Image (cartoon, rainbow, N blue to C red):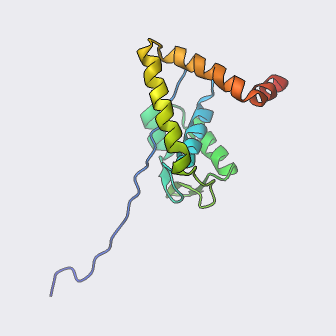
Amino acid sequence: MTPFPYFTSVIVKVPTIRFRLDPSSGVPTYLQLVHQVKHAVQYGMLKPGDRVPTAREVVEDLAINPNTVLKAYRELEREGFVYSRPGAGTFVADDAPAPLARTVHQPLRRSLDRWLAAARAAGLDRESVIALMTLALNDAFPEKEAAHERRA
């Protein structure tokens, strides 16, 4: 007889997202967290059932106020991206928006990577790339800019 006639397997899902903050962006910290979770879901880096980092983990990693993280997670929950289980954490919701098909985003990402390499080779720094990309985005999506101006 073996000393352990049975075993229990435990599956621990490791978070697949690491938050990064840009204090110079002008975007509130909690919204940066919200956008990053949404993007991770949209591009399939986070899937339904995946745990997002706990507020404590985010606070320790980024040295920010816990209320900021909790505000971001409440917003994500309100929008249906995540749900929380007390004592267990916050998880991507089963009915979160489906990720974009790889056949759509992978060719675009490869094209963007080539464009960024060309921009760097031309001597553009990060700020110059962001400025150029912002101009192009504003031209491509003028309704977003118009909506922002109406609110201001």
Total marks drawn?
0
Q: Nearer the viewer, residue 7 or 120?
A: 120
Whole-percent x, y for residue 93 in the image: 59, 58
Question: Quadrant of the rendered structure where residue 146 is?
Answer: top right
Side (left or right) of 148 relative to 122: right
Query: Is residue 102 placed above or below 108 in the rendered structure?
Result: below
- If the image is split into quadrants, where does the N terminus sit? bottom left
Quadrant showing the C terminus:
top right
Residue lying at the far right of the rendered structure: 150
Please provide percent x and percent y for residue 148.
78, 26
Q: Position of residue 62 (x, y in %)?
A: 46, 32
Which of 15/60 is in front?
15
Seen at 63% across and 53% down, the residue is 97
* Residue drawn at x 66%, y 53% as measured from the top left: 80
User: From what the image shows, is residue 108 above or below residue 121?
Assistant: below
Q: Residue furthest left?
A: 1
Q: In the current view of this chain or complex, which residue is farthest to the bottom?
A: 1
Which is more toward the observer, 42 or 75?
42
What residue is rendered at 54% in x and 43% in y? 105
Seen at 40% across and 52% down, the residue is: 14
Residue 139 seen in render: yes
Q: Identify whether 137 is placed above or below 37.
A: above
* In this rendering, position of residue 137 left or right of residue 20: right
